[in-house]
Image: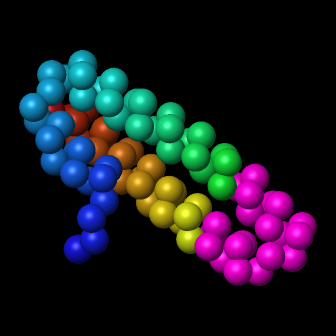
Amino acid sequence: MNVDPLRVRIRFLGALTADERRAVIQEAQAKLHEHLEAMQGKARRDQTSGDVFGRLVTRGAILSVRAQSSCLAEVQEALLSQ
């Protein structure tokens, strides 16, 4: 398994109150959304410039951020049902 700082933080959410957990998840989702928008802008620039390898690297980053956001959504849903 690779090291993922987001998963490490999720592991320790139990040390927080419910309100603190909610705030941490919301902040992380907001930051991921900002990062995703930046990466999508870079992908457009890579496409325009013809930077094939840059576009491929950026595409990998976009997929990674989407996966993290999806994971956080599942965490949030699981915590709401507690």
Q: On the rendered structure, is 24 left or right of 51?
A: left
> Does residue 43 sit above or below 33 in this rendering?
below
Front residue (pair 70, 63): 63
- Does residue 21 sit above or below 19 in this rendering? below
Quadrant in which the N terminus is drawn: bottom left
> Please, which residue is most extreme toward the top here?
19
Q: Position of residue 20 (x, y in %)?
A: 24, 22
Left or right of 31: which side holds 42? right
Q: How many marks?
A: 0
* Foreground of the two, 70 or 59: 59
Q: Is residue 78 left or right of residue 58?
A: left
Residue 63 vertical position relative to residue 69 in the rendered view, above or below = below
Residue 67, percent across and down? 44, 60
Q: Residue at x 77, y 80 (%)?
A: 52
| Residue 80 horizontal/vertical position (percent) | 25, 32
Image point (62%, 73%), residue name: 57
Q: Quadrant of residue 14?
A: top left
Residue 74 seen in render: no
* Corner quadrant of residue 53: bottom right
Residue segment shown in magenta: 40-59
Residue 45 magenta-drawn?
yes
Q: Position of residue 2 (x, y in %)?
A: 28, 71
Q: Provide the major secondary structure of the magenta segment.
A: helix
